[in-house]
Image: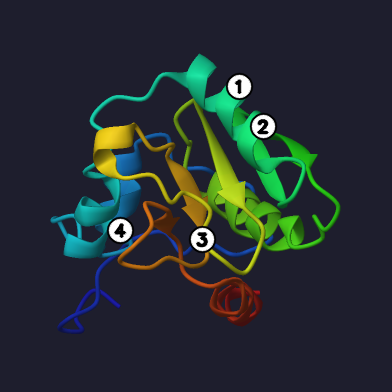
Amino acid sequence: MGGRVGYRRAPVYAENCFCPEQEPSEWLTNMRCPGEVPNQIQRDFAPFPTIDLDRLVQEAIERFAEHHSLCHYSIINNRIYRRTFGQHVGFKMFSDAFLTSLARKVALPDLEFFINLGDWPLEKRLVSQSPLPILSWCGSEMTRDIVLPTYDLTESTLETMG
């Protein structure tokens, strides 16, 4: 392999391997991720320069748990913990799958977040009304949800990698 033009010696992360790269920047380089954050992600995160986790947990559960389906994730020491809210939480299997896949490949930072498990955006507050940062598989110009790739795209990608 050393003589071929265009080939680099970098680890190949098998889907069933638990071999997390300890340096996220090294993993991003190995995966040839772009150095710049895409415009869509910048726009989605712009309303949230800082996040009050206590407020997020309390308000997300109060506002969305009864009539919607969502999942509260905590990642601590590269271990994934979750608590679901709502009646129809089966789509958590897709977010579980991509988070588990990532944790096998790169040491994730400690963090907490909510994922909307439904098929419609949740956060309709304007930026001036202090919206909550909710990750969703859907969004619109009228909502503040932070858009993820759809669950079917995520699932097919993970199946292909398997």
Q: Are marks 2 and 1 in contact (CB under 8 Å)?
A: yes
Side of 18 relative to 69 (left or right) = left
Give the mark, 3 or 4, whose residue is nearer the N terminus. Answer: 4
Crowd around label 2: few <14 · some 14–19 · many ≥20 (10 Å): many
Q: Position of residue 27 (x, y in %)?
A: 35, 50
Q: Amino acid at mark 1?
A: Gln
Residue tagged 2: 61
Q: Are marks 3 and 1 in contact (CB under 8 Å)?
A: no
For the residues labelled 3 and 4, the Cα–Cα distance comes to 33 Å
Give the mark, 4 or 2, whose residue is nearer the N terminus. Answer: 4
For the residues labelled 1 and 4, the Cα–Cα distance comes to 38 Å
Q: Position of residue 83 (x, y in %)?
A: 76, 35
Q: Amino acid at mark 3?
A: Pro
* Helix, strand or loop for disc 4: helix
Q: Amino acid at mark 4?
A: Asn
Q: Quadrant of residue 78?
A: top right
Residue tagged 1: 58
| Rendered image: mark on residue 121 | 3
Relative depth, front residue between 121 and 22: 121
* Helix, strand or loop for disc 2: helix
Give the mark, 1 or 4, whose residue is nearer the N terminus. Answer: 4
Q: Is residue 155 above or below residue 126?
A: below
For the residues labelled 3 and 1, the Cα–Cα distance comes to 19 Å
Q: Is residue 107 above or below residue 39?
A: above
| Rendered image: mark on residue 30 | 4
Residue in view at x 65 percent, y 36 percent: 72
Q: Are marks 1 and 4 in contact (CB under 8 Å)?
A: no
Q: Position of residue 5 (x, y in %)?
A: 15, 83
Q: Nearer the viewer, mark 4 or mark 2?
A: 2
